[in-house]
Amino acid sequence: MRGFKEASFSDRLSTAAKARQAQLEKARAATRAGEPGLAERQAARAATAAAREERAAGRKSEKLAREAEAKKQRAAAEIARLEAEKVAAADRAKEAAERAARGVALQAEQKAARDARYAARKKRQK
C-alpha cells in the first residue's frame, strides 16, 4: 500500500522532465558564454545548410524538368501511335473495299460463265 506523501508515477515523470530541461538550459548557457568560436561555427553551419538547400532545390528543379520532358515524350509517342492506328485502319478499310470489289467482279465473272454454259446447253438442245 502506498504511503500518504509518496509521489505518483506522473509526478515522478514530470520531476524527471523538469530536471532534464534544467540540465539542458544549463548546458546551453555554458556553451554560449564560454566558447569564443561559436559564432564562426554557427555561420559555417548556416552556410552549409543554405548550400544543401540550394542543391536540393536544384535537384528538385532538374527532376521536374526530367518529368516534364518524359511527359512530353509520352504524349508524342501516344500521338504517333494514334496516327499509326489511323493509317492502319485506313489501310484495312482500303483492303476491305478492294476485297469486296474483287468479290463482286468474281461473282460477275462466274455469272457470265454460268450464263454462257446455259446458253450453250440451250443452243445444243435446239
Image: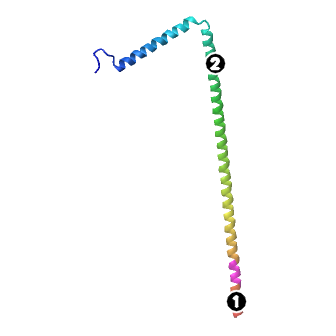
Upstream in sequence: badge 1 or badge 2: 2
Q: Is residue 86 above or below residue 98?
A: above
The magenta stretch is: 110-116
User: Which amino acid type corresponds to the residue marked 1 in the rendered image?
Assistant: Arg
Q: Is residue 53 above or below residue 39?
A: below
Say what secondary structure mark 1 lies in.
Answer: helix
Q: Point out residue 45 in the picture as x, y percentages from the top left corner.
A: 61, 16
Q: Residues within 10 Å of mark 2 (few under 14, many from 20)?
A: few
Q: Which residue is mark 1?
A: 121
What residue is drawn where x is 68% and y is 82%? 114
Taking the image as shown, residue 15 lies to the left or right of residue 50, namely left
Say what secondary structure mark 2 lies in.
Answer: helix
Viewer-nearest residue: 7 or 105: 7
Q: Residues within 10 Å of mark 1 (few under 14, many from 20)?
A: few
Q: Point out residue 111 in the picture as x, y percentages from the top left corner.
A: 68, 79
What residue is drawn where x is 39% and y is 19%? 13
Q: Nearer the viewer, mark 1 or mark 2?
A: 2
Q: Quadrant of the N terminus?
A: top left
Asked if the magenta segment contains residue 75, the reply would be no
Q: Point out residue 75 in the picture as x, y percentages from the top left corner.
A: 64, 43
Q: Which residue is mark 2?
A: 48
Q: Quadrant of residue 61?
A: top right
